[in-house]
Image: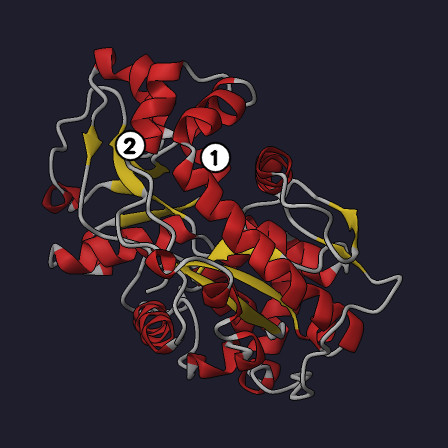
Amino acid sequence: MSPAHPSLPGVDRRLFLTSLLGATAAVAGLSGCAGTSAAAGTKGASTAPLADKVPSGTSLKIASYQGVQQLEFKLAKFGELPFTVADWPNIGAGPDVINAFRAKSLDVANNAGIPPIQAHFQGYDAKIVAINVTRKPNYLFATKPGSDIRTVEDFRGKKLAFSQGQAQGVVLLRALKKAGLKYDDVNLVPLTSNQFFTALQAGQVDVAPLANQQAPAYLKQYEPKGARAITTDVVDLLNLLWAPASVLADEAKAAAVAAYIPYWAKGAVWQYEHPDAWNKEFYVKTQNLTLAQAESITALANKPLFPSSWAEAIKWEQETADLLADGGFVKPFKVGSLFDHRFEGIAAKSVPAEYRS
């Protein structure tokens, strides 16, 4: 099978989709790329005003990766949601979320900016409904044990773990661009983020982007063996909520999504304002980290910032889509179609002024 883009002679986009999304999703996505993807921005979108009250009997299935949302709500004692949560699936990775959306086993998810772009490329219609802006890096680059890599410039000719449909992927691409490296200067190895640890440990890749909360455990074990962390100032700006267009076209479910957004925003603020409690209840009790490791993570935590206007977010998302298109990973398109502006400002209005951007 020939490569899909000349700028990446060693990378096959069909292989990426198959390895990241599963054979069924890959076939569906590839068959929809040429036709349905272009139309996905408007198909199924609703312009109906949001209902003031959530109708009785409404339920949503909301992703809560590692139980974060439930724990935030439990500790902060926000009170009952005005709808029923039918399920809190432990789903976090973008490709998994897209598959869950397709299977109708998930209604709302929390991801970075790249999964909505990937969904559009596959011809799946979903919309962004809330934005939390990230100003500090959430990821660093970890090297395999025994590596001599010390800067991003040293990535030239190396094997880099790359997840096309996840935030880690765009952080890597942005870091390469900033360092002046082209795609064919490196060897991008298609993996999902849950494979990064194993690939690093086994030396299958030279570098992988790890989330700040993942890095301490890896470095504790492998730094004595020559692994190291490479930090950059590259950020993945968007932490967002999104939902299938079919969910948002349902008046009752759309009202429930709107009602959920303030809980999501207030939960993030509570977590930021109570690092000691969060360290103990989440990182130590549920993630099995030491208190010192937990404190090192929360020290790097981003202050939640919810914009009243999505203009900056749309600009950033367009830059990300263009970056992916330049590498042949997706087809060029205008990202404005990914945002459902009926929900713009809901998150910002629900938090104190210091948490608005």
- Residue sticking out furthest to the right: 57
Q: The residue tagged with tag 2: helix, strand or loop? A: loop
Residue closer to the observer: 28 or 194? 194
Question: Where residue 314 sits: x, y (%)?
Answer: 38, 76
Callout 1 touching callout 2 (CB < 8 Å): no
Rendered position, 280 above or below 159: above
- Residue sticking out furthest to the top: 224
Color encoding of the figure: secondary structure
Report the disc number at residue 299: 2
Q: Residue, x 24% and y 58% (percent of image)?
A: 174
Query: Can you identify the residue that label 1 sits on?
Result: 195
Q: Residue, x 41% and y 72% (percent of image)?
A: 308
Residue closer to the observer: 303 or 181? 303
In the drawing, does residue 264 fall left or right of residue 175?
Answer: right
Residue 225 seen anywhere in this rendered image of the structure: yes
Q: What amino acid does circle 2 point to?
A: Ala
Question: Where residue 294 sits: x, y (%)?
Answer: 38, 23
Question: Where residue 256 sits: x, y (%)?
Answer: 72, 65
Residue closer to the observer: 74 or 167? 74
Q: Residue, x 45% and y 65% (percent of image)?
A: 348
Rendered position, 90 above or below 296: below
In the drawing, does residue 207 fall left or right of residue 34?
Answer: left
Question: Where residue 242 sits: x, y (%)?
Answer: 57, 64
Report the disc number at residue 214: none
Q: The residue tagged with tag 1: helix, strand or loop? A: helix
How far apart marks 1 and 2 lie (CA) works out to: 26 Å
